[in-house]
Image (tube, rainbow, N blue to C red):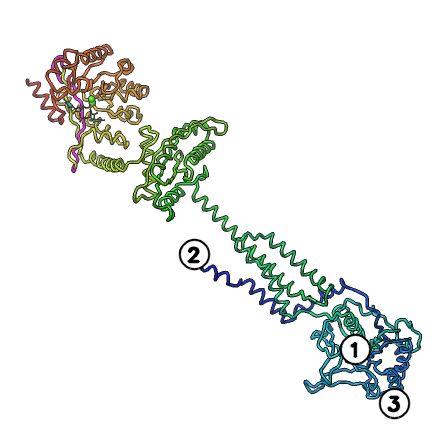
Amino acid sequence: MSAVRARLGRLAGLRALRPSLGLLAVAAAVAAVMATGLLRPVEDAFAHLRFSLLRHQPSQALTVVEIDAPSIRAAGRWPWPRDRFAVAIRNLEAAGAKTVGFDVDFSLQSDAAADRSMAEVIAVRPGAVILPTFVQEASRKGALVETHPLQGLSDSALIASVNVPVDTDGRVRRYHFGFGGGETYRQSMGAALSEAPGQRTGPFLLDYSIQPYDVPRLSFEDVFQNRFDKTKVAGKAILVGARALELGDTFSTPPYGTVPGVYLHALAFEQLRAGRALFAPAGLVTFGLAMALAFWLRAARLDRDKGASLAALVRRHAFAAAAILLVPVAVQAVSPISLEVAPLILAQALCVLWATRAELDRRAKAIVAEREAGLLHLALHEPETELPNRRALLAGIAERLAPTAEDAAARCVAVAAVGIDRYPAIRAAVGYGLSNLVVRAVAGRIEAACPGARVAHLSTSVLGLAVAAPDAAGLEAVIAGLAQIDPNYEVGGHRVDAHVKLGVAYAGEDADADSLLEHAALALDLARRDDEALVVFDPASLAETQVNLALMTDMQKGLAEGQFELHYQPKWSARDGSVTSAEGLIRWRHPTQGNIRPDHFVGVAEETGRIRELTLWTVERALEDAARLQAAGRPMLLSVNISGRLIVDDPFCAAVLAMAKGREKQLCLEITETALISNTEAAQASIAAFRAAGMKISIDDYGAGLSSLSYLKMIDANELKLDRSLVLEVVESERDRKILKSTVDLAHGLGMTVVAEGVETEEICGVLASLGCDLIQGWLIARPMPLAALEDFLRQREAA
Ligand code: C2E
Ligand code: CA
Ligand code: CA
């Protein structure tokens, strides 16, 4: 996956060349709309806006003489006889008119005399009168027919075209310099009146920033009657044309609606005279501008997160909109260039849509990403403490085990399980909510002690961390630092002591995250059991644990299948040689491992919590055997060994009491001295209960640990068993004899019988007897033996 991505990254050059689909779409839309002319109303509106903003007054160099309704009414008919025009030309020339142009049809004969009188007037100043021609399409397609003024009239006159090109929508936006070429070239009326140099053809845009009716004008009738303002004529170009609607010489214009044709010529005159033949840049240029704008405004930059913010894009749009509105006005004010804006507006509008889409898309993606992040957070964190959870830690361990290629060789990894001591007590003291804060605080200190470690919350009072260092020594230093964490916390106004214990597993050759974490947790268990601040996981101990677990499974089976036996070792009276009690010692004949020593499996049963089960079996066994011996006429006091932790185990004690009900007198419980010392109060209560029920209590292994004579007073026992280590040297050591003597005396003083254990020789036996020991137990008397053998032993002694 990442390899593919890397390869794609290398193709980044190509990707940059890939045109943005969005830009292509904008280009296609703009081109299509430009081609269809759908934008013309928009363009007109903006052109109108520019014309209004740039409005100015005409030059006063041309005056229109309107053939208006009053003129027609005064003449009483239309067409007029040409002598009316002759009078008008004479009056105008008398007033000093420079040229007189006509936008009136003179192609047909009127009345011969009148036509002649007009021709005569024109001939007075050859070239001062301009007569119109009109080019139109003949019925035969493609052929042009020119409607020419009468030969007699045109002899001394200039000829100019009054054609006005009408756009497909019926409106007039353009005007031509002239038509045709060479021999047939015709300058247009506006150009001729403005005395523009000849031979130019082609259209230019009409500048409607002069309002047509602002052009100075006179009524034809007034001119005809010679009662007009001569200043409007002197030295000026005059254009005579129809104003009256009934004459039908009108055109539709985008800004002003219907305008008489004569005014269009007048506007063209004004433009050409001022050298402002407006033109629009070619469509391709406008398209190019629109595309440049779209590129500048492209929303694609919102998709990729290249620091292009929405705000920046909005600013660009605002700037672009202002530029679209104002730049064309400015350009048109200083030059005859009329910029088209509709394609730019369209491009921008499309970019707005595109950006909106991109932004919505981006937001939707952001929401999805946020939700995903939330879910991921939930999956990787403990809800109570908001700390990373076990899953997150496993990922963190895996990351450190398989680091990036560069530093892989030099990485050492450790996983630690950190247990907070006495957590239930802390929780009880500060409350549930604050106890979570304690956990967080501990996690915080761990993080501070191990920069770069991943710390997680594994269970109520256990945190975990994964830490890596370049070398083993560094790693060990970090772990050692962990053990030194300051245990004093201040949480919610409470002062809390939170000591921690550490279980650590160092990663070996082929470590995996799961087993490392498990090993750290096992090490923490050991640390807690042995009350050690730090335990490093040792594979051997894991093997042992696994063996022990298997052993316990076997034990359960063995109890059910009769692999266990209780052997008895007699206790011999040094005073009278009688044997009235024996100690029960458990034996296990394992089907595959042979005889297993009790020292071994008893300890394992204690560690794995199976000791209750095992001991209840021996109690049951001893009670049955005692019953059997009594039935055989040889009542014996049988003792069983009770491991230290059972004496404070209430369910166990209750079970023993229930089991021995009615037979309590035949049972003695041997409890090791160390168990009694470490749990004196609880043990005292249990012992009292057993004693009350009639059972005997024996203090076992006295002298093996840190025995204290004063402590003996606190335990209400029947018997004191001197450990073998105490009696071994009794023959050689005077000191041992003295200690033993005082012990025996004290025990007797407290009303206890004294038993010497592990007596193997006559010599020791003799010394012990002389010191006052009541009972002797050991190989000298007999080895532990099955019940049947014990019966034989007793029978033989009786016989002796
Ligand atoms: P313990 O209670 O001190 O038992 C005495 C141990 O000394 C026995 O070992 C016994 O066989 C051994 N012994 C007896 N006389 C001599 C002697 O003259 N010389 C020597 N060297 N040893 C002698 P055993 O049977 O292997 O038991 C070992 C320990 O296992 C016992 O020590 C006791 O703590 C524990 N144990 C045995 N059976 C049970 C049981 O049923 N329940 C519990 N909880 N512990 C048991
Ligand atoms: Ca014992
Ligand atoms: Ca013992």
Horizontally, is 335 left or right of 482 in the view? right
Q: Is residue 728 above or below residue 177?
A: above
Magenta span includes 202 = no
How far apart in space, not on screen, are marks 3 and 2 (Cα)?
A: 95 Å
Residue identified by numbered label 1:
192
Residue identified by numbered label 2:
5
Residue type marked 2: Arg
Given this view, does label 1 or label 2 mark the residue nearer the observer? 1
Few, some or many residues within 10 Å of mark 1 (<14, 14–19, 20+): many
* Residue under the image location 34 percent in, 31 percent down: 534
CB at mark 1 closer than 8 A to ligand 1? no
Given this view, does label 3 or label 1 mark the residue nearer the observer? 1
Q: In this rendering, does residue 81 appear at all?
A: no
For label 1, the SS is: helix
Q: In this rendering, does residue 796 appear at all?
A: yes
* Residue under the image location 17 percent in, 34 percent down: 563
> Can you give x and y, in whole percent of width and height, for residue 213 in the image?
82, 69
Label whose residue precedes the other's in the sequence (3 or 1): 3
Q: Is residue 90 above or below residue 606?
A: below
> Can you give x and y, in whole percent of width and height, for residue 671 in the image?
24, 22
How far apart in space, not on screen, are marks 3 and 1 (Cα)?
A: 28 Å
- The secondary structure that most of the magenta stretch takes on is strand
